[in-house]
Image (spheres, rainbow, N blue to C red):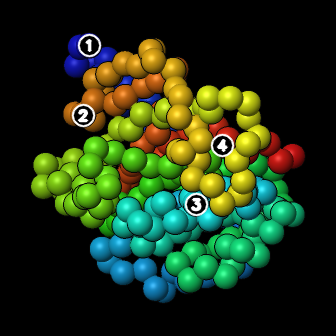
Amino acid sequence: MGRAAELRAAYTLRWRRRRLLAQSFAKRRQIAAVADRTADIAPTDILVFSTMRNEMGRLPHFLRHHRAMGVNHFLIVDNDSDDGTRDYLATQPDVSLWTTPDSYRKARFGMDWLTVLLARYGHEHWCLTLDADELFVYAHHDVRNLHALTDWLDATDRASMGALMLDLYPEGPLGASTAQDDPTRILTHFDAGNYLMIPTARGFDSVRASQVYQLLIHSLWDVREDQHGGGDHA
């Protein structure tokens, strides 16, 4: 790519980011605080940002898994759940919770709401954006927590890290698990192929599987825009 083309691409991307930011901040009044514990966030805390609806069956393990890895605080937007998700999250001491009855789809599948929270609370923090049906793992995560990972990323001057989105399946029929099950003990199978390493302009390799992306981010500008797994709430 020539210099002129690179400048055009950078200019286009900059204006696209500005447009998306403006769109997000226009929706900032759609979310209302239920339990705001953000005053407890320490300067070195690692944060999770998530939008969810009716995820009570997954929440206990989702929180347990990421707490064990070193996540210090969860900032969650509940999209009008009616299965106990909101009440459960409101009682968790490391969760700050917002709620909205507005359209998940029209909010860019929740990313407009999360962008507002990322801009307000994510600055100078390592942040993960996750859905309730996603568990973040990496090499040696069982013996080296997230702070060890982010220390290494800082030491190597990396502002973000690409991660593979891997869909897991059970050996037999779906529906055998219970709300408290560790899904990794039941969902033991995955597709063997269609994974690519892709060089990016940010100076690191991003990993792609079936055109789905997930990013560990350290900057508002790297917020991912993939579709939330819980489906639209009109």
Residue 79: image quadrant is bottom right
* Kind of residue at badge 3: His
Which residue in the protein does label 4 denote? 228
In the figure, 134 relative to 227: above or below? below
* Kind of residue at badge 2: Phe
> Which of the two discs, 2 and 3, labels the residue nearer the N terminus?
3
Which residue in the protein does label 3 denote? 61
Query: How far is the residue under mark 3 from the one under mark 4?
Result: 19 Å
Of helix, strand and loop, which one carries label 1?
loop
Say which of marks 3 and 4 sits in front.
3
Query: How far is the residue under mark 2 from the one under mark 3?
Result: 31 Å
> Which of the two discs, 3 and 1, labels the residue nearer the N terminus?
1
Q: Which circle marks residue 204 in the picture?
A: 2
> Which of the two discs, 3 and 4, labels the residue nearer the N terminus?
3
Of helix, strand and loop, which one carries label 3?
helix
Q: Is 165 on the left or on the right of 26, as rendered?
A: left
* Kind of residue at badge 1: Met
> Which of the two discs, 2 and 1, labels the residue nearer the N terminus?
1
> Which of the two discs, 4 and 1, labels the residue nearer the N terminus?
1
In the figure, 108 relative to 152: above or below? above
Residue in view at x 37 percent, y 67 percent? 70
Q: Position of residue 120 (x, y in %)?
A: 49, 69
Say which of marks 2 and 3 sits in front.
3
In the figure, 156 relative to 93: above or below? above
Q: Disc 3 vs disc 4: Cβ atoms closer than 8 Å? A: no
Query: How far is the residue under mark 2 from the one under mark 1?
Result: 18 Å
Residue 31: image quadrant is bottom right
Q: Which circle marks residue 1 in the picture?
A: 1
Q: Is 222 on the left or on the right of 59, as rendered?
A: left
Of helix, strand and loop, which one carries label 4?
loop
